[in-house]
Image: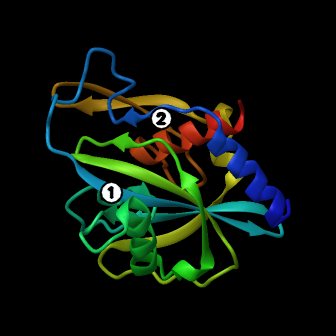
Amino acid sequence: MRYRDLRHELKAALARSGAASSDFDLDHGVAMTPGRPLREAGVLVGVLETDAGPDLVLTKRSSALKHHPGQISFPGGKVEPTDQGAMGAALREAKEEIGLDPANVEVLGALDSHETVTGFTMRPVLALIRADFTPRAEPGEVAEVFRVPLSHVTDPARFSVQSRAWRGGRRHYFAVPFGPYYIWGATARILHGLAERMHK
C-alpha cells in the first residue's frame, strides 16, 4: 500500500463514527466515580509504511515504572501546560520516549477518548510516520520499541475479551496478542475502536 493510499484509508476511518471508551466499559454495572478529577493525556498511534505493509509503532514500558509496568502502550503521556493539547503531548512524548522527530510525523486527526482507571482521559492521535527512523528508547521508562503489522491490530477477528481478578471481582478487557507481546487493556481497547472504524 502506498503512503497516499494509506493516508486515504486512515482518514476515511477517522471520518466514520466511533464512541468514547473506558477501562471498564466491558464490565456491566461497573462505572467510574462520577465527577472524579481526570488528567488529560495524549498518545501517538503512529503508522509507518514499509515494503511489507503498514506497521504500528508500540512500546513496552519499563518494569520499574509505578503505573502499568511492563505493559504494551503507545508513546505518550500527560498534557503539560506548555503542550498544544493532547496532540502536542503525544508528539513531545514520542520524541522523548522513542526518538521520533515531530517533523517526521503527519497528524491525521484524533480518535475517540479513553478514560483510564488511573484517572486519565487519553486522546489517541492518529498519525503517519513519513519515513523510517531509528528508535531510541528512553532509559528508565521504555524497555523496548517494536512494530506490529497494522493489519493484525485492525482485524476485529484477532481480538478477544479476557478477564482477570481485580479488587475482589473480575475485570474484563480486550486483548490482541502479537508474538511475545501481550497487547491488552487501554491500548487494545483503543485499537479495537480503530479496527471497528476501519471495517465499517
The residue drawn where x is 80% and y is 65% is: 3
User: Which residue was labeled with disc 1?
Assistant: 41
Q: Quick check: 27 left or right of 13?
A: left
The residue drawn where x is 68% and y is 47% is: 152
Q: Dot 2, crowdedness within 10 Å: few (<14), some or many (≥20)? A: many
Rendered image quadrant of residue 109: bottom right
User: Tag 2 or tag 1, which sits nearer the N-term?
Assistant: 1
Looking at the image, is 89 positioned above or below residue 148?
below
User: Which residue was labeled with disc 2?
Assistant: 174
Q: Position of residue 169 (x, y in %)?
A: 22, 23
Q: Dot 1, crowdedness within 10 Å: few (<14), some or many (≥20)? A: many
Look at label 1 and name its amino acid: Ala
Residue at the extreme top = 29
Rendered image quadrant of residue 115: top left
Secondary structure type for disc 1 = strand
Secondary structure type for disc 2 = strand
Looking at the image, is 8 positioned above or below residue 142?
above
Q: Is residue 109 visible?
A: yes
Report the number of numbered marks. 2
